[in-house]
């Protein structure tokens, strides 16, 4: 983002003391309303509307938040003034130091301090793999979506009368989802323009999902409205090769995909492959918590799912099938083709790793649990579709399902 036009206002602030903390600053850390793979950041002290919006909505949000100290746009680090959204590369930080300090300043010691603390602070700010980092900004009349358009890969402008209110995304799939909505948005994933040390540019370079919510200073309700919308429609996580649908929180850690239900949006959640398959062999390990309910989807046609959860996978006549994971439902025990064929036996158990082998060929699906044949169903409905997983969502964050060693081979 071009620093020369980004903000048209500066508050008269005060020099900060240098307490112990990243870059010598007293960052304020707060938990959000409940756990989740999201991180929120308020980075400019004088952008008070953004801070108010985040503070007021924090009890509704998942994850955690970090607030910059003070009420000034700039911060003081080792006696030098710098824009805190230019800390994220040495080159960008040096440009900011030279802009806001006397020519006699030697930037070297400050840059060395920033280099020392940057990565450890980023470990705190950047969410778990696939999670979303959200920053909130305010702007003055000289800055708008028109400023960012030349540096953007895609632009969605349904509100031309509100050019100062817009989202900036670094993930193309996030942008494409937002572009179906009513608010202005840009995508910046390809690092156009010069290195400016901004957090958005760093996230784009590292493949981190990032969403910046820009609003005119003073438009508190507009900023809160857009943040609520973002939380309502945006997947909490994105895992490479998969897309989350409807409800649920999915994370990837050390090769294990974990699903829990979303406290703010109870109801079934799905994680489906971006590719569709016809005939294939699927092998995976699964782990289900005591009393849990999950499933593996085969040949599920890709479609949109309602955020209200009223369009469930494998429920329509043209849908694929769910291979059940449930050790408590006599009608649909683990190994069942849900609501179509019970398993011949119940194999495996809760709170332990089990192994599924699922083969789809024509209208036939064969299911083995821990090496034992439990189902051979010959009336598969859908000829083609995605593979996926479910978290059922009746008891938010209590039921947990995990998957690992997932291998899909076309046959």
Image: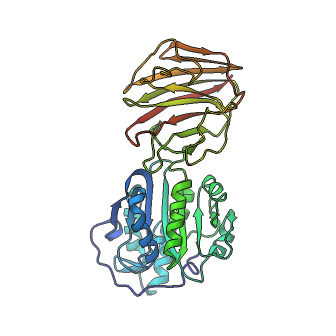
Horizontally, residue 323 falls left or right of residue 364, namely left
Residue in the foreground of this view, choosing between 298 and 220: 220
Count numbered badges in the picture.
0
- x and y percentages locating residue 360 in the rendered image: 65, 21
Q: In this rendering, would 39 be left or right of 28?
A: right
Q: Position of residue 145 (x, y in %)?
A: 64, 73
Coordinates of residue 44 in the picture (x, y in percent): 44, 74
Quarter of the image where the N terminus is located: bottom right
**Residue 91 visible somewhere in the drawing:** no
130 versus 218 height, above or below: above
Which one is in front, 29 or 226? Answer: 226
Q: Is residue 317 left or right of residue 259?
A: right
In this figure, which colouring scheme has been used for the structure?
rainbow
| Residue ID at (56%, 15%) | 375
For the question of whether residue 364 can be seen, the reply is yes
Residue 367 picture quarter: top right
What residue lies at 69% left-to-right and 25% top-to-bottom?
381
Residue found 34% across the figure and 84% down from its top: 14
The percent position of residue 258, horizontal first and vertical second, equals: 45, 38
Q: Quadrant of the C terminus?
A: top right
Residue 56 sits in which quadrant?
A: bottom left
């Amino acid at each position: 983002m071009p620093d020369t036009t980004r903000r048209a206002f500066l508050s008269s602030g005060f020099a900060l003391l240098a307490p112990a903390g990243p870059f010598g600053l007293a960052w304020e850390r707060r938990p959000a309303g409940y756990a989740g793979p999201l991180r929120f950041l308020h980075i400019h002290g004088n952008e008070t509307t953004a801070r108010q919006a985040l503070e007021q909505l924090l009890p509704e949000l998942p994850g955690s938040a970090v607030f910059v100290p003070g009420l000034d746009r700039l911060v003081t680090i080792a006696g030098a003034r710098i824009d805190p959204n230019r800390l994220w590369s040495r080159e960008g930080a040096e440009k900011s130091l030279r802009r806001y300090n006397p020519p006699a300043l030697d930037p070297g010691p400050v840059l060395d301090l920033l280099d020392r603390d940057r990565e450890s602070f980023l470990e705190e700010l950047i969410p778990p793999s696939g999670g979303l980092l959200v920053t909130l900004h305010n702007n003055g009349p000289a800055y708008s979506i028109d400023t960012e358009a030349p540096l953007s890969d895609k632009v969605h402008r349904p509100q031309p009368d509100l050019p100062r209110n817009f989202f900036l995304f670094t993930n193309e799939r996030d942008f494409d989802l937002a572009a179906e909505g009513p608010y202005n948005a840009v995508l910046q994933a390809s690092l156009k323009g010069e290195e400016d040390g901004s957090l958005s540019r760093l996230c784009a370079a590292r493949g981190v999902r990032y969403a910046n919510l820009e609003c005119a200073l003073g438009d508190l309700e507009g900023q809160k409205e857009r943040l609520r919308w973002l939380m309502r429609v945006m997947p909490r996580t994105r895992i490479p090769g998969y897309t989350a649908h409807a409800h649920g929180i999915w994370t990837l850690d050390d090769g294990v995909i974990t699903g829990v239900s979303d406290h703010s949006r109870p109801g079934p959640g799905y994680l489906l492959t971006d590719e569709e398959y016809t005939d294939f062999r699927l092998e995976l390990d699964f782990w289900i918590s005591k009393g849990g309910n999950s499933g593996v989807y085969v040949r599920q046609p890709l479609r949109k799912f309602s955020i209200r959860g009223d369009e469930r996978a494998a429920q329509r006549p043209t849908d694929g099938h769910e291979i059940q994971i449930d050790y408590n439902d006599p009608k649909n025990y683990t190994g069942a083709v849900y609501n179509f064929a019970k398993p011949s036996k119940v194999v495996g158990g809760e709170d332990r790793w089990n192994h599924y082998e699922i083969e789809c060929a024509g209208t036939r699906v064969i299911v083995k649990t821990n090496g034992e044949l439990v189902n051979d169903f010959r009336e598969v409905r859908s000829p083609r579709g995605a593979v996926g997983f479910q978290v059922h969502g009746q008891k938010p964050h209590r039921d947990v399902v995990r998957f690992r060693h997932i291998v899909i081979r076309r046959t």
